[in-house]
Image (cartoon, helix red, strand yellow):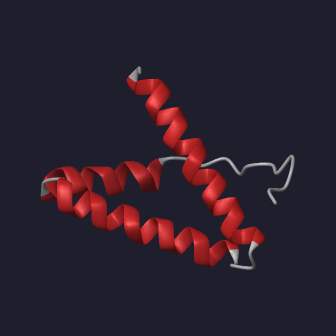
């Protein structure tokens, strides 16, 4: 499987899990904060300090677009 395809697959799986958590009553902030905390720990564990700081800088400078829910998961 191509790297881009694998990345798209895991992104979609994790995003669907996030939507499911919200559908189960967790707030958007709770879900987002949990994923952010996990992401930060993973990055901190696997990146050098210099690369970690560069990743944080890139994240702060990146404009994120909101998503539109087209359907709900049940």
Give how far across and how far down residue 51 sits, in percent.
19, 50
30 w.r.t. 7: above or below? below
Q: Is residue 48 left or right of residue 41?
A: left
In-front residue for pair 4/52:
4
- Name, please, the residue furthest toward the front: 74
Give how far across and how far down residue 11 sits, in percent.
53, 43
- Name, please, the residue furthest toward the right: 71
Residue at image x 72%, y 70%?
22
Q: Is residue 60 left or right of residue 65?
A: left
Give how far across and how far down residue 6 sits, in percent.
45, 31
Task: Quadrant for the C terminus, please.
Answer: bottom right
Numbered label tally: 0
72 w.r.t. 27: above or below? above
Task: Quadrant for the N terminus, please.
Answer: top left
Q: Is residue 19 left or right of residue 2?
A: right
Residue at image x 29%, y 60%?
42
Residue at image x 45%, y 25%?
4
Give how far across and how far down residue 64 sits, in percent.
60, 49
């Amino acid at each position: 499987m191509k790297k881009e395809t694998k990345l798209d697959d895991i992104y979609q799986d994790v995003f669907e899990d996030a939507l499911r958590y919200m559908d189960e009553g967790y707030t958007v902030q709770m879900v987002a904060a949990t994923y952010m905390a996990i992401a930060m720990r993973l990055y901190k564990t696997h990146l050098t300090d210099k690369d970690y700081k560069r990743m944080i800088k890139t994240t702060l400078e990146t404009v994120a677009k909101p998503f539109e829910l087209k359907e709900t998961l049940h």
